[in-house]
């Protein structure tokens, strides 16, 4: 018996066995995989989506025709001028606990004197205008003020301004009490 070669075989046999087992395990694992084909179901769903989109477009077309006809009929009968809801300073003071001036943007939590003046310069001077302003536009105005205004989050400002505009003072006071610095 040759003991010099025996040391090599002690390493070579387990190594070859491991490689062979690894290859066999890989091949068995690959053969048991099953490819799922969902293309038929996907095509069916795409067709349903296209039909629903066509139905939606048809309904929107009918709605536009009906609303145009209704608007023409209303205009022909009696043109109405949209009026702002009346401002009730007493109700505002009762709910908010301080005197409120009409269209004072500082009532909105998160807006102070500087931000209010920035919004005035940006053409937003009333609660109604702020309530109809997109949050992205509010953020643009803040970004125009520099780094010190990046800490402010205008996400709730249009919603708060709408409550002011509609005279929902008790709802506004409750909302401001429940939220931390006007953040949603």
Image: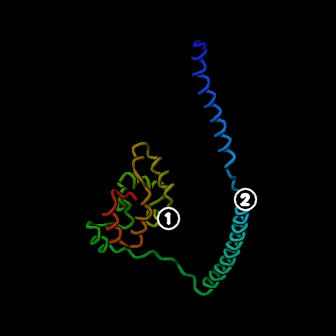
The picture places residue 59, in percent across and down from the top left corner, at 67, 76
**Residue, x 72% and y 67% (percent of image)?**
50
Quarter occupied by the N terminus: top right
Q: Earlier in the sequence, mark 1 or mark 2?
A: 2
**Residue, x 29% and y 67% (percent of image)?**
96
Figure disc tally: 2
Quarter occupied by the C terminus: bottom left
Side of 18 where 47 appears, left or right = right
The picture places residue 178, in percent across and down from the top left corner, at 32, 63
**Decide: marks 1, 2 in contact (CB < 8 A)?**
no
Q: Which residue is mark 1?
A: 132
- The residue lying furthest to the bottom in this view is 77
For mark 1, give the secondary structure: loop
Residue 39: mark in rendering? 2
In-front residue for pair 35/93? 35
For mark 2, give the secondary structure: helix
Q: Is residue 28 above or below residue 19?
A: below
Q: Is residue 70 above or below residue 145?
A: below
């Amino acid at each position: 018996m040759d003991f010099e070669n025996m040391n090599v075989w002690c390493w070579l046999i387990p190594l070859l066995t491991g490689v062979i087992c690894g290859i066999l395990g890989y091949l068995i694992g690959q053969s048991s995989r099953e490819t799922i084909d969902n293309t038929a179901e996907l095509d069916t769903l795409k067709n349903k989506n296209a039909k629903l989109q066509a139905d939606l477009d048809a309904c929107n077309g009918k709605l536009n025709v009906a609303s145009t006809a209704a608007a023409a009929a209303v205009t022909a009968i009696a043109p109405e001028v949209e009026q702002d809801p009346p401002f009730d300073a007493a109700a505002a003071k009762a709910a908010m606990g301080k005197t409120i001036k009409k269209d004072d943007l500082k009532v909105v939590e998160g807006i102070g004197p500087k931000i209010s003046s920035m919004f005035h310069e940006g053409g937003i001077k009333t609660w109604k205008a702020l309530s109809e302003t997109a949050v992205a536009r509010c953020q643009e105005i803040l970004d125009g003020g520099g780094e010190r205004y990046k800490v402010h989050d205008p996400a709730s400002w249009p919603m708060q301004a709408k409550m002011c505009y509609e005279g929902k003072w008790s709802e506004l006071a409750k909302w401001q009490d429940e939220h931390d610095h006007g953040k949603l």
